[in-house]
Amino acid sequence: MARRYPNARGPAVTTNIPIYTLSGGVSRQAQSKRLPNEAENMDNALVSLERSFEKRPGFETVIQYSASNIWNNNAASSVPNANRIDLFPLSHAVGTTKDYWFYWFNINEDNRFLIVVDYKATGSTDVLVYAFRLRPDGTWSDETQYSAANQQNSTIINADTRSYITYGNSTNNAKDVLKATTVGNSIIIVNTLVYAGFTSGESGWNGAGTGGKLFGLNGAETATTDTSGTKLTYYSSARYTKGSNSYWYLNTLAGTSTTITGTLAVGNSVTLGAAPSLPSGLTYGTPTTSPVTINPSTQSKVYAATADGSLITLSNWGTTGTTFTIESISTGSTITSGSTITAFSGYFVEVEDFIWHDATQPWFGQSLADFSEIRFPPEYAEVNGNNGIVLTVGGNPITYDNTAKTVLNTLYGTSSGNGKIYFTAAPYLNFTSGYYRIISSASKPYTKKVRSPDCYSVVDKRRMPQKIVYNAAAALKWTANPINWEPRTSGNRFSNPGPSVFLADDKVTPRQVQIKAISTFRDRLYFAAEDVVFTSQLGVYEDLFLADPSNIVSTDPIDVRASSNTFSEISSLTPFNTYLFINTLGNVQYELKGSQNQITPLTAEISPTAFYSTAKFIEPQLMGSLIYFFDSSKLYLYLSSESADLAVAQELTVTCPDYLPNTYRSICVAPAQNYIIMSDNAAQNYLYFHASRFAGDRNLQNAFFRYVLNTNDSILSNQSYNDYLYSVIKRPTANATTSGTTTPTTVGQVPGAAASQTNRYYLEESYLRSYSPSIPRLDRMIKIKMYDNNSDYTSDSNQTKIRVPITFPYADIANIQLVTDSTWTTDVDGDRAYEVVSPVAYFLKDTYIELIFNGRFVPINSSRAIDYSIDRNVYIGLKFTMEVELSTQFVRDQNNNAIEGSLNLRSITLRHKNTGNYDVQVSNRGRTALVSKFTNQRTDDNQDLLNLENYEEEGEFTANILGFSDSTQIKIVSDYPTPVNIVNMELAGKFIQKSSPTA
């Protein structure tokens, strides 16, 4: 601030200080350090390089498609939904628990949707996903898929999907928890609180068919049996006995009823009362030479079974055929020493071990060298081959292990459990190693590859990101379901473990982790959990496993860790140009890229490039060829290693500290206008803008300014399309009504009836460029065509009553203004276009307002009869105030340094374009402001001062200041509906240069 000293005084010099533009926006630096193009405050002004600053366009309400006439029945006590202009399905009583999450889904210009997820919709028929279409004609329509009135059942919203999306809603906010990315006509949504991983671990599993237990959304193991990802065993389709000559003998013999004695525990020896019968050619004890017989192989197994489903598997037969070693006991077995059991000498062989002894006919076995050894076409019996342990005991077939069949049915559909399964040890052509099931003997395809039997082969779709799908041609256009992630079909947990974060290093212990970020880039889905980035296969978004672990190729998933020296939890993934920008909570930024512009599992590398703190819940924003990211009250511009010798981030708010909010609600970019737009999470009626323009490597503009809406407005979501900003605004209804009275309430007075307030949500748009001067600058603006069912005119009192299907707290009514449009040019009483009036009284209802204006605002014909066939429109909205406060002014040298001295300002001259009314407020030493008003009205014109036509295309206005610069506050203010565009300014005064005492 300039200081005045009593000594070392120079002569008073007449000085002019030009301010060529205020395109620099707001600055919070010391006054003397600011540039001449920076202001102290800029509220409700639109800043640009081309036009300096102007009063912003108002927010106009986007109306419902079916309500284009803004109809309201005279006698109705409420407005029917078809004629409401708010997003009425979202309405709820004030105090009701609702937490909406908003996502803009852009398919093409004809199909732009606002998707709204109710984070609190936990009920089985609660509406979880709303879809509002932004139509090409500028209206919106409700295209939510309902199963019944205000309901969505499980045919629309899968129950697991509902549980996933709404998880954690009791203690968290949707905006901090839910994230999404778009893949084609689908939205992939992730709940960052849910612990993802494989379906189950080894706990609770044994070889007799008891599966592992599912993990819950919180990552804890539940009591529910896993029917899709449990560890399992694929068995041969029939029973066999293996001879000591390594030949396999088909065994269809019935069991032998006998007893079992001994201590029944795995590894112990037991005795059967009788040896089970063997197929022809096999014998116990001493083999014979005529006919030739051999012993069973010691590897061959025997079953001891009972009718209640108990099963003991025996091996290591003794010479008498009655002594064996217990290999496994089924869970819950009731067999005890001395029990009567049925003994079967043949067993179902594990597929991987079933190698046929004749190499010329390998297909008789089920473990093959590669896919070429399968016989085609298969036999019909192979299509119905059994996959499990089924034995006939007591004349009835008893299933002892149905795990494989159950899993196959769960993963691949009903009846998928049957079919002979082959194991191929090596790849052949395009057929990778793994397990193949015979599905047809009549036509191709004959086989289908199935999941590996090892545990950790199936990612739990209940706890992974979910999918919201739009299908315009389907009966159900919007559905939400889990993604059917492909199971592992090659290798095991050691050779093909899948996402590394889902397993501990020992490959035995499962891990449950929260997925914190998701993105799509170069035909892959990218996920981030902890400090690891992992992806899907190239082009196969549902597959997270290697196709063939023996041959890793460029299409296989990528799995890399980001931490460098310190742990850095990843918070966001942003695709950009040739790399993926990775932001973390560890104050480090990374780039994921590959060699020669190819990101593959063989070339992917991740490296730290910048070290800045960031806001926890805010995604970086892309605009043009630049990336912007946020911290509390800070905005950074990221410069990659491709655009600089060293990748760094520059703080753009360095000249404007603590101006941006500490926390953000919604952020979007307007690329055509080079704006970043962010709403304040605390003061939700504040909307902050950052404008940046570049010419090559020169930054021409780095400006901050803000819009301030009515205090009853909460801006919840923002999105830019073309030249418009679209915002979802929450607003309460009337806090008092005039119900029960026929007498209107005078504006400024409080209505007498109580009201139950409702929160309503509106979709509003604001133009982001210079607006036509003939459009009034009003918020909540609605354009209404005058009809007999929305207006009344009383000639005796010369008053017009207009009904508007909108309602809000009564205090806001004092700011309402009506402006006629160009259709009033040919009115019977002359040119009445762009008249501006305010209401004098009102009726305030729960769902609409009746506003009473002095004067006639209904169409009449030449006979002065009301004639609604004549087209007449009016704008109705709330006035708002533009306020631009100038920085303290200094006389500066050629290097822009402030010169020490006393500056006495005399006047300010403002040059404007297409400007109607504005005020210059000058406050000296905190005294009452002196107001100088500009209007373009001429002395020979009796037109209303506020008439929108009353603007000047080019002109200037001079206002007195008469104060020292360091104690004078200068503001340019407009609360009029007329346009204002200040092109440049010049201040005139006297300057006395002084030296400090030390000088």
Image: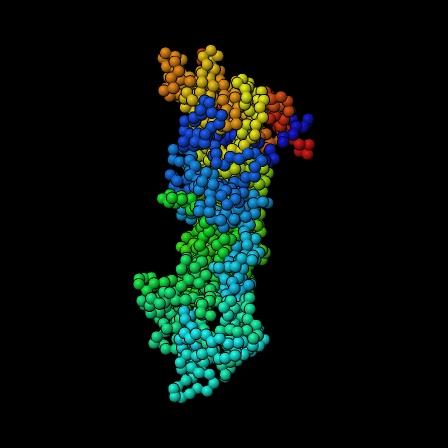
Task: Work out whether residue 313 or residue 687 is closer to the camera in this orientation and state it.
Answer: 313
Above or below, comparing residue 168 to residue 149 in the picture: below
Question: At x 58% / y 51%, what residue is drawn?
Answer: 586
Question: At x 41% / y 23%, what residue is drawn?
Answer: 785
Q: Quadrant of the N terminus?
A: top right
Residue 378 in picture, x, y percent from top left:
33, 67
The quarter of the displayed image where residue 383 is located: bottom left
Q: Most extreme residue toward the front, as rendered?
A: 395
Q: Quadrant of the C terminus?
A: top right
Residue 439 in picture, x, y percent from top left:
36, 63
Task: Work out whether residue 571 or residue 66 is closer to the camera in this orientation and state it.
Answer: 66
Q: Is residue 110 in view?
A: yes
Above or below, comparing residue 165 to residue 976 in the picture: below
Question: At x 39% / y 13%, what residue is drawn?
Answer: 865
Task: Work out whether residue 382 or residue 963 is closer to the camera in this orientation and state it.
Answer: 382
Q: Is residue 20 in view?
A: no
